[in-house]
Structures are given as C-alpha cells and as structure tokens.
Image (cartoon, coloured by chain):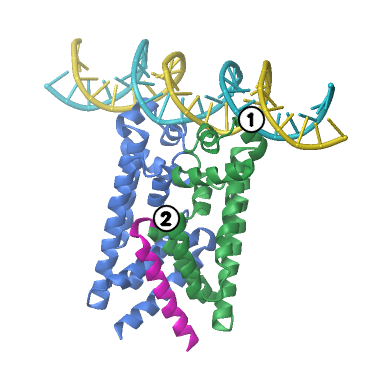
Chain colours: A blue, B green, C yellow, D cyan
Amino acid sequence: MDMTNKLTAAAERLFDRHGYMATGMDRLTAAAGMSSRTLYKHAGSKAQLMARVLTERDRRFMARLEVQSVDALFAALEDWVRVEGTRGCLFLRSRAETGGDTPEIAEAVAMHKAAFHLRIEEVVAVDLGRQDPVLAEQVLVLLEGATQAAVYRGADAVSAARAAAAILMERART
Amino acid sequence: MDMTNKLTAAAERLFDRHGYMATGMDRLTAAAGMSSRTLYKHAGSKAQLMARVLTERDRRFMARLEVQSVDALFAALEDWVRVEGTRGCLFLRSRAETGGDTPEIAEAVAMHKAAFHLRIEEVVAVDLGRQDPVLAEQVLVLLEGATQAAVYRGADAVSAARAAAAILMERART
DNA sequence: CATAATGTAAAACGATCGTTTTACATTGCA
DNA sequence: TGCAATGTAAAACGATCGTTTTACATTATG
C-alpha cells in the first residue's frame, strides 16, 4: 500500500469519526505514519485531502449500488452500515462543516449526489420497467433517511426503510 | 430582547450557516453585538452556547409538531424548511462535528431525538387509532430523509416524502 | 559512483483558537 | 449619594491551527 492510499484511508477514518474541522494535521500525520512534509507532498492541502477522501468514498459506495432492484439498494445500504458504521452522510457533513465555502469539497459532494440520484433513477427504471422520477425521489428520501436515522435508531431504521420502499414499489407495479 | 436571547439567536444562525467548529468566538461577539466578556457571562463556554442553541431549537421545532395527523407532520416540515432553510439537521450535524465527545452537545441531541421519536409514535397512534412502532419508524425515516435530501434536492424531497407517508398510512388503515 | 527522488524529524511561520483579565463607563436602586 | 450590577473595549493568555522550511537519511537508477 503506497503512501497516498495509506494517507487517504487514515484521513477518511479520522474525518468520519471526529469531523473535518476538528481533525488537525498533526493527528493526520500520526495516524498515517508519515511526516508533514510527505503528507503535503501527497495531499496538497487539507481541503484537497478531504476532496480525495470523498472521491474515493464515492467510488467505494457507488460500486455497492451496482444492482438491479430497489430492494437490493437497501440491502447494499444495510451492508454498508454494518461494515462502515453509522455516522451519517460524510458528503453532506463535510459540506455543512465548511458552509459550502470550500470549492474542492463542494464540488466532490455535488458530483457524488448527482451520481447517487442518477443511479437511483436507473435502478427504479430497471426494477419497474419504466421511468418514475417521483418514485425515485421517494426511494432517494428513504435511503437518505435510513442513513441519517441509523445514527441514533440503529439498523432498524434501514430495515424499516427497506420495507417502506417495497410497499411503494409494489403499489407502483400494479 | 435581552442579551441572552440575542446571543442565542445570533449563534444559531452562525452555527447553522457555517458550522459549529468553523464559527469563532470573535464572529459570535460581532454578530451578537456584545463584548467577549459579556458573551462568556451569558454563555459560559462555546459548548454550552451550542447546547443552549439546540435546546431552544428543539423547543421551536417541536412546537410545530403539535399536530394530530401524519400528513400534518410533513406539512409542518414543509413550513420549517421554507422558513428556516435547508442545511440539514443541526442536532446531528453538531454531534457529528464534535465526534459525540462534547457532553453538553451530545445530551441536547439525545434529548431532542428521543422527543422527536416519541412525538412521531404519538401522532401515528392518534392518526391510525392504534400504535404501530414499525410504521412510526418509517415515518421517522421519511422525515429525516426529507430533511437531509432537501439540502440538495430542494422542496421536492419533502413533498415526495409526504406522498410516500400518505401511501404507507393508507395501506396501514385498510 | 554520482545523482535524483523520496522519505523523516523538527523547528518555525504567522494566524487564529477559546478564554480570561485589566481598566473603565453606565445604569438602577437603597 | 453611593454601591452593586452590567455593560464595553482591548490586551493578553497559552494552545493549536494549516503550512513551509531547514537539515539530514535512505534508496533506486543512470
């Protein structure tokens, strides 16, 4: 594992656990096991590092959403929550922490959320046999809500969302 | 309007707009129009100020949820989003920003989310004529999801959630 | 063998952090 | 009239912020 990946992985863990603003560069260098000189050679700046973390997270998260049914979207989210834990959406969190005023971060978040929305519309269309933007919006709300509610309600929130989506899909199908 | 209220209102606005960690005390004193000495007399500390902001916000938000139907919950959220804007849930945001390690904040968030969950269970019970914890969890997920999704999807997210809740309620009623 | 690349360790940069203190003005009430 | 309360303005506290720099070690390749 090269230094850039080690740094990105350590940064994702710390930013997710403690927040972007609350995580200092000294903590980052200690966790990544490198000097600050090396860190800045690979990261450029703290904001660029966060952007890289988000891009990498988008890659990993979206790979899990390569499915063919709405139910599988929620199964994927259940897996994600079990593996990665439940601290809310890191994309929206990091944008909110910076007030949307850090361009690298705002752009990475916009990219991810656009891809996320598009993917849901695609999966709904495949599952339903036709496009249904309103239903897709409801599925998106359920996925966001499950992610958010799982922080304090636990895995029950995700399975409740999954069951709700099944009802909405069934109704749209008949 | 006394100084404590003026301070709390200014703090809520800044914390919500720029984030808790990113908002410095000098910005707070400037926005509240008072010296740092007076600020600390009234606030105690930054963390206590955030806790007061959250307690006040909980009071204002929960007052809007004193309704008798699930649909009215979503109507209330639509009003809230229109009046207060859409920057996500300030409670979960401030807890995430501090990693859950600031007791005053973590407690205020826990208080609010417990009350929020309880209120939803009550409204579902009144609307449905019986208790239904799973349906209540689904309504909670839809409310959280609408709040979160509205940040980047706008008001459509809230109306989509509202329609989804109506379908779930209708199905539970028959 | 020389050299370019890549790394560490640590000091230093100026800026800003949350908080306290010093010194003084204004006001309300006994 | 005098004192306690409440406020402002501003300097200062030590700590920490993100970032750069200086000085030196290691390694891979021509």
Which is more toward the observer, B97 or B5? B5
Q: At 60% from the left edge and 43% from the top edge, which residue is drawn?
A: B49
Does dot 1 land on a helix, a strand or a loop? helix
Most frequent secondary structure within the magenta stretch: helix
Vertical order, B118 against A4 (above or below):
below
- Indicate the quadrant where residue C7 lies: top left
Q: Is residue D18 above or below residue B17?
A: above
The residue tagged 2 is B86
Range covered by the magenta-colored residues: B151-174
Q: In this view, does B91 lie to the left or right of D18?
A: right
What residue is shown at x 24% (from left), y 67% (from top)? A122
Q: Which residue lies furthest to the bottom in this view?
A: B174
Q: Position of residue A78 (x, y in %)?
A: 42, 64
Of the numbered discs 2 and 1, the one sitting upstream in the chain is: 1
Residue B162 in magenta stretch: yes
Which disc, if any, is residue B37? 1
Residue A17 in percent (x, y) is at: 48, 46
Examine the rendered structure and indicate whether residue B85 appears above or below residue C8.
Answer: below
Mark 2 to mark 1: distance in Å?
33 Å
- Residue closer to the observer: A64 or B99: B99
The reply to whether the magenta stretch includes residue A122 is no
Tell me the amino acid under the disc marked 1.
Arg
